[in-house]
Image (spheres, rainbow, N blue to C red):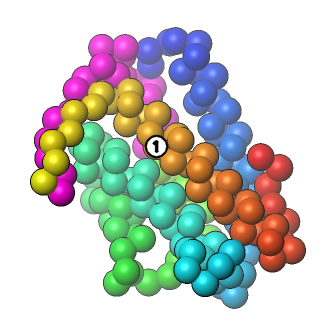
Amino acid sequence: MAQDSTLVTFSENWKVYQDLLTKALAPLSPEQLALRAAPHLRSIGGIVTHMVAVRARWFHRVMGEGGDDIAAIGEWDRSNMPLRTASELVSGFETTWQLMQDCLGRWTQTDLEHVYQGEWQGEPYKFTRQWVVWHVLEHDLHHGGEFSLSLGMHGLEAPDL
């Protein structure tokens, strides 16, 4: 890994954050996973499913990391997919975490500066690998807060984020 102490600090604390989320997630029943903060918002399970799927999509589709197992996880939040149990979601967190850590463990600073270019929905994009890592982290933070708030609204134990 690019042994930058900032990257190490972010990675270590991201793991702590994930562990807090999975601890709160693991005991949830299918009924609890179906709860929503409001009718038009994702369910608790839907929030976590989205978090896991987005990790897989960015790392697999955009950066070419991981195999068919990661590609499959990247589809979990699509409308035609089955609902996932808490155990499956915890496993998805762990699988995507391992992939991300493997990548960060072997990428050099030069690797992190690699630029991806393409087009999405008719618009050109250009971003670095390090931006993708940051984007996935801030996505986890955003939706982790949403997950925690939704748990608390329903009287369920929320992680102390």
Quadrant position of residue 126: top left
Q: Which residues are magenta?
A: 97-121
Residue 125 in the figure: left or right of residue 85 = left
Regarding mark 1 in the picture, which secondary structure is present there?
helix
Percent x, y for residue 50? Answer: 48, 64
Whether residue 16 sits left or right of residue 92 in the image: it is: right
* Residue extending furthest toward the bottom: 31
Image quarter where the N terminus lies is: top left
Residue at 52% x, 12% y: name it. 4
Location of mark 1 (residue): 136
Residue at 67%, 62% in the rendered image: 147
**Magenta stretch contains residue 109:** yes
Residue positioned 68% across, 75% down in the render: 37
The answer to which of 152 and 23 lies nearer the viewer is 152
Estimate the x, y position of residue 159 in percent, counting from the top left: 79, 55
Q: Is residue 62 above or below residue 87?
A: above
Is there any visible trace of residue 88 in the rendered image?
A: no
Residue 54 in sight: yes
Q: Residue drawn 46% across and 34% down? A: 134
In this rendering, position of residue 111 left or right of residue 156: left
Q: Is residue 48 left or right of residue 65?
A: right
Q: Is residue 11 above or below residue 22?
A: above
Quadrant of the rendered image containing residue 80: bottom left
Residue 138, position as x, y percentages in the image = 53, 41
From the viewer's perspective, is residue 146 above or below residue 7? below
Looking at the rendered structure, the kind of residue marked 1 is Val
